[in-house]
Amino acid sequence: MTQDELKQLVGQAAADYVNANVPQGAVIGVGTGSTANCFIDALAASKDRYLGAVSSSVATTARLQSHGFRVFDLNDIESLTVYVDGADEIDAQGAMIKGGGGALTREKIVASVADVFVCIADASKRVDVLGQFPLPIEVVPMARTAIGRRVSALGGVPVLRVQKDGSPYLTDNGNEILDVKGLRISDPCGFEALVNAWPGVVTVGLFAERGADLCLLGTETGVERIDYPKR
Ligand code: 5RP
């Protein structure tokens, strides 16, 4: 199976999970990226079962709306039963690197209010130790160099994310992203807390303190469900 086929497989599995476990009339938290898009497309068939969705990016909002989903502002929602999103890497404890698509801040906010975080990923995303995938850090632009120095002192190599024309990539929040190469993150919760505390960091793309509760992993033999212990 190709990676795209695996993404479609887990997107459908996540829609089946939501339809089976989330009450009718609920609002669904929805992530960003190509795997999350497969979930949105699969959930569209049962759109009328739900009141709507809370979105984690401008791109996801557009995709949800193209299927006729009502998209709510998170400020107008009291709780979310479930949040479904992809990942760039996921370890055996359900800690993740996210933000390859640049939506890490809104993803972390929406995930933080959800009862259950369902990660959907193809098997290539499963790792023993996080860090092979460059760790995204969303930064306030004036802090870019100062944060880069702190990253370098820890042995990481910060690379400013740029667009095709060479100008800095800007997030939906108007900030920049440093993609940090060369890390081996053996203590994801500790590393997340450390980087979060640096002035100018908006969000680090480590989702460890609030990691996944379960993962639907697309493998050659089908969808494997992995449940992680409560933190
Ligand atoms: C976006 C994300 C995505 O979930 C992550 O990059 C995985 O993307 P894809 O499903 O396209 O492989 O964190 O900010």
Image (cartoon, rainbow, N blue to C red):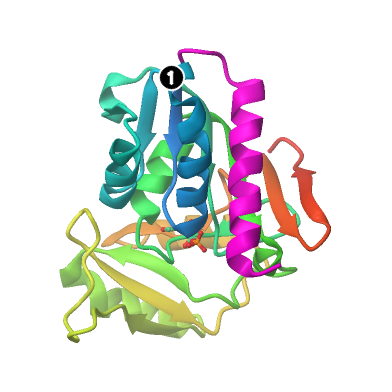
Would residue 43 be found to the left or right of residue 224 on screen? left
Q: Which of these two is toward me, 46 or 53?
A: 46
Please rate how many residues cluster around mark 1, counting C-alpha atoms within 10 Å: few if below 14, some from 14 to 19, many from 20: few
- Would residue 12 be counted in the magenta stretch? yes
Quarter of the image with the C terminus in it:
top right
Compared with 141, 121 (above or below) is above
Would residue 122 be found to the left or right of residue 36 on screen? right
Question: Could you say where residue 218 lies in the image, as x and y percent from the top left?
Answer: 71, 56
What are the residue bounds of the magenta stretch?
A: 1-25
Q: Secondary structure at mark 1?
A: helix
What's the amino acid at mark 1?
Asp
Question: In terms of secondary structure, what is the magenta stretch mainly?
Answer: helix
Question: Could you say where residue 163 lies in the image, as x and y percent from the top left?
Answer: 23, 78
Q: Residue at x 41, y 57 (%)?
A: 196
Q: Which residue is mark 1?
A: 48
State which quadrant residue 167 falls in: bottom left
Question: Could you say where residue 191 lies in the image, as x and y percent from the top left?
Answer: 54, 63
Residue at the extreme front of the image, as rendered: 45
Compared with 227, 165 (above or below) is below
Quarter of the image with the N terminus in it:
bottom right
Would residue 120 be found to the left or right of residue 230 on screen? left
Q: Residue at x 59, y 74 (%)?
A: 131
Q: Is mark 1 within 8 Å of ligand 1?
A: no
- Would residue 104 be counted in the magenta stretch? no
Residue at the extreme right of the image, as rendered: 221
Compared with 25, 110 (above or below) is below
Question: Could you say where residue 217 lies in the image, as x and y percent from the top left?
Answer: 71, 53
Q: Residue at x 51, y 34 (%)?
A: 43
